[in-house]
Image: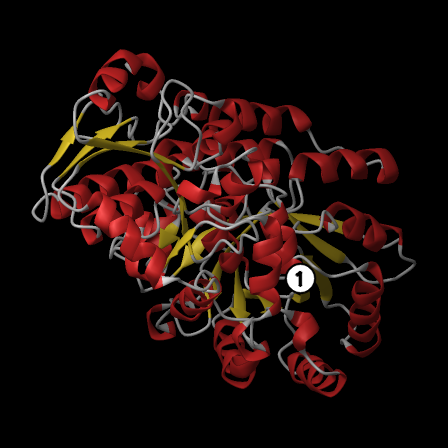
Amino acid sequence: MNQIHVLDCTLRDGGYCNNWEFGYENKRKILKGLIEADLDVIECGFLTNKIVYDQNGTKFTNLSEISEILPTDRKGKIFVAMVNFGEYDLEKLPCYDGTSIDGIRVAFHKKDREKALEWCRIIGDKGYKVYIQPMVTISYTDGEFLELIQKSNELEPEAFYVVDSFGFMRKKDLLRLFRTVEKNLKEGIKIGFHSHNNMQLAYANAQTLEELETSRDIIIDTSVMGMGRGAGNLNTELFVEYLNEERGKKYDLKPLLILIDEVLSNFYDENYWGYSLPNYLSAKYATHPNYAGYLDDKKTLTYEDMNAIFSNMEEDKRVYFDKEYMEQLYNAYMRRGAVKKEQLEEVHKNLKGKKVLLIAPGKSAEDEKDKIIACSQQPDVVTMEINFKYQYIDTDYLFLSNLRRYRNMEQVEMKKAIVTSNILSDDGGIKTDYAELLNANEYVKDNAGMMAVKFLIQMEVAEIMIAGMDGYSHNEELNYMNKEVQMNIKKNVADQMNRGMEEVLKELSREIPIIFVTEPKYIRI
């Protein structure tokens, strides 16, 4: 019976969730736990020349940095690192002497396959186990894939991988690729499988490989708690328990559960990973997972909108993440609605020279409602709410820039709604150009509050009085006065958004007086 080997890549693939900043002691603790769990191959991180080494991270610039965290007693485990083709100077790679890692995984895109195989040859000649990792394996034609296998045979690597980079590989796709490798790969070379979980197929596909009748030894990549970019990876704890049941393996789950409890759950709380509809959509359209994260972090789109944007992508832009290209698609999508200038001219007449009380849906709008009510009753004050209905006063205007919020609002009086052009409403509203209200800060470029302030500046108001604009807490339940507008925000994104709001408001206050009626909770102005 063939052997199934488990390669844990928590310290490498999991690094996409915490910028590879695990902490020095946590790195050692994770390695110790993986060894105690009796896993077969342990990946320590990336080997790269594109960083300055930090001992708290798992991106390394040389093998001695990796050696520092490896245990004296390796208990027969194989330790590896990954190199992305083109990101390391192989002249600096010493010949294998057993003091550091045992093997190197070479990841490469199809366009680089010829040069990447030469890298694999150099690494193998230096004595290391070589793992050949053709990313987005399904993108190869049959001829290209067969040629890659045949050229890999000449190198006699430790393993040749099928890589489901975007997490959309179905069983039929996996079996077709596996059988092609099995039939054409030189005897004795292991077949590896690396998956992502965008469509919740990682566990099912791993079981499919385990159940195959084959003489080939197979390596299955996993990570503890599924830690990995976007939807994450196959969970180590789930798969080793499955192997214990089906193959009589003796992997120890207890060390893995301790790691989850003491280390990884903290990272999950900071920057969660796992299945989500944006990650599903990126897989559905076979696109780089960073596109899903980019659109999801906007917090302005419905899933229907995301689906439309993905469907508009050019084929040659899907494999590599191009932030500028996605920004262009996003902005074009958000400018679909027609702007009626005559309506805006009427609003301009009503607002010019007035003081405007701008009410956002933060908790302070509830906690300090008396201040807001008193302010609204001052003479010549115009009131405007942002993306929600403020229950304590009848406002003069409603500023709407978020399609999700628009759809969730009932009985909106569209005759007094200022609607940005990304919202294709059939029931009226005063349309204003979405793009004209953007700012330069990446994290709050189209934040509703910042857009509303810019709109009021365009309307030449005399002063803006802000209420309920608190910034963002790490605890999502503290962010809004109404649960209906609540949304999940990753902690690191919340911090960036707070800094962005501070920066943009400070800049806009040079153009117009801006005062706060309520005390902001998470930003400093």
* Mark 1 Cα-neighbour bin, 10 Å: few <14, some 14–19, many ≥20: many
What scheme was used to colour the molecule? secondary structure
Residue 114, percent across and down? Answer: 55, 85
Picture layout, residue 190 above or below residue 123: above
Q: Residue at x 85, y 40 (%)?
A: 247
Asked if one can make out residue 233 in the rendered structure from this viewpoint, the answer is yes
Please tell me how many numbered marks the rendered image carries.
1
Residue 239, percent across and down? Answer: 73, 40
Front one among 65 and 462: 462
Asked if one can make out residue 525 in the rendered structure from this viewpoint, the answer is no
Front one among 271 and 471: 471
Picture layout, residue 8 above or below residue 163: above
Residue 470, percent across and down? Answer: 29, 28
In the image, what residue type sits under mark 1? Asp
Under tag 1, what secondary structure?
loop
Q: Is residue 330 left or right of residue 6?
A: left
Q: Residue at x 85, y 64 (%)?
A: 172
Residue corresponding to mark 1: 164
Residue 196, percent across and down? Answer: 64, 53
Q: Residue furthest right?
A: 213
Q: Residue at x 51, y 47 (%)?
A: 403
> Where is the C terminus found, in terms of image quarters?
top left
Q: Is residue 440 left or right of residue 129?
A: left
- Name the image quarter holding residue 144: bottom right
Q: Is residue 401 left or right of residue 41?
A: left
